[in-house]
Image: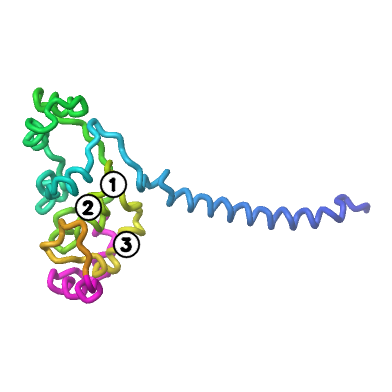
Amino acid sequence: MSQIFNRSTNAIARLSIWGAVFILAGVGWAASILNRSAYNTSQGVTVKQPVPFGHEHHVSGLGIDCRYCHSSVEKSSSAGIPPTATCMNCHKLVWNESPMLAPVRESFRTGKPLNWRKVYDLPDFVYFDHSIHVAKGVGCASCHGRIDKMRLTAQYPSLQMEWCLACHRNPEKFLRPKDKIFDLAWVAADQDALGKELAKENHLRSTIALTNCSTCHR
C-alpha cells in the first residue's frame, strides 16, 4: 500500500503541537498582563466628576482633615460623601461666583445631591468596612496612597484580591498609632516593631481568620 502522507507531515505535526503550546502560553501571559493592567483594574485612572474636586488643594493646601468631609469613616462601613451643605460652608464665601462651582451652588439651591461617581467601586460580592480598618490602626494612605498630592482623585491600588490578601496576611506592615490614622505623610521609624506591638494592642484576629473567605465575601 502506498504511503498516504509525505514524511514531512511528521515534522509539521510536531511543529504544530509545539506551536500550539507556545501560542496558548502566550495567550495566557497576555491575559495575565491585561488582567493586571489599568484597563481592567482602573488603577491610577481618574474619574470624571460633576465638579473637579482636588484633594491636593483641600488637604495639603488648606489642611482640611479627612473626617470633615468623610464624617462616617470611623463608625460606618462607608466613608460617606459630604452633602453639598458641607461644601457650601466654605464656598458661600470663597469662590462663590466661580463658574466651575456652579453645579455645587445649584445642588445647594435645589436640594438635589450632586451625582458623584465612585472611584473605589468594589464588586457587589466584596464587603469592605472602613470603620473596622480605622479601629484596628490602618491609615487612609494604606488604601488611598498620598491622596493629598492628587490634583484629581484616582484609584491608588489595583483592588484585586491579591492586593487585599497581601495586607491580611501581614497586617503589621500597615498598622499605625490611632492619632496617625489620618496623617497621610506619617512614616514609622521602625514599622516591624511598631506593627507587632499594635497588632497585639488592637487585638487583630489571626491570619487564618483574616484570610477566611467569609471575611470579605458575605
Do callouts 2 and 1 mark residues in contact (Cβ within 8 Å)? yes
Above/below status of 55 relative to 87: below
Judging from the image, what secondary structure is the residue with disc 2 in?
loop
C-alpha separation, residue under disc 2 versus residue under disc 1:
8 Å
The residue pinned by badge 2 equals 128
What amino acid is labelled 1 in the image? Answer: Leu
What amino acid is labelled 3 in the image? Answer: Leu
The residue pinned by badge 3 equals 165
Colour mapping: rainbow
Q: Which of marks 2 and 3 is nearer the N terminus?
A: 2
What amino acid is labelled 2 in the image? Answer: Phe
- At a point 9% along the width and 52% down the height, the residue shown is 75
The residue pinned by badge 1 equals 122
Judging from the image, what secondary structure is the residue with disc 1 in?
loop
Q: Earlier in the sequence, mark 2 or mark 1?
A: 1
Boundaries of the magenta span = 189-218
Q: How many labels does the image show?
A: 3
Do callouts 2 and 3 mark residues in contact (Cβ within 8 Å)? no
Residue 16 in the image, given as x and y percentages of width and height: 72, 53
- At a point 6% along the width and 36% down the height, the residue shown is 89
Side of 3 where 156 appears, left or right: left
Question: Which residue occupies the foreground of this view, 23 or 33?
Answer: 33
- At a point 32% along the width and 63% down the height, the residue shown is 166
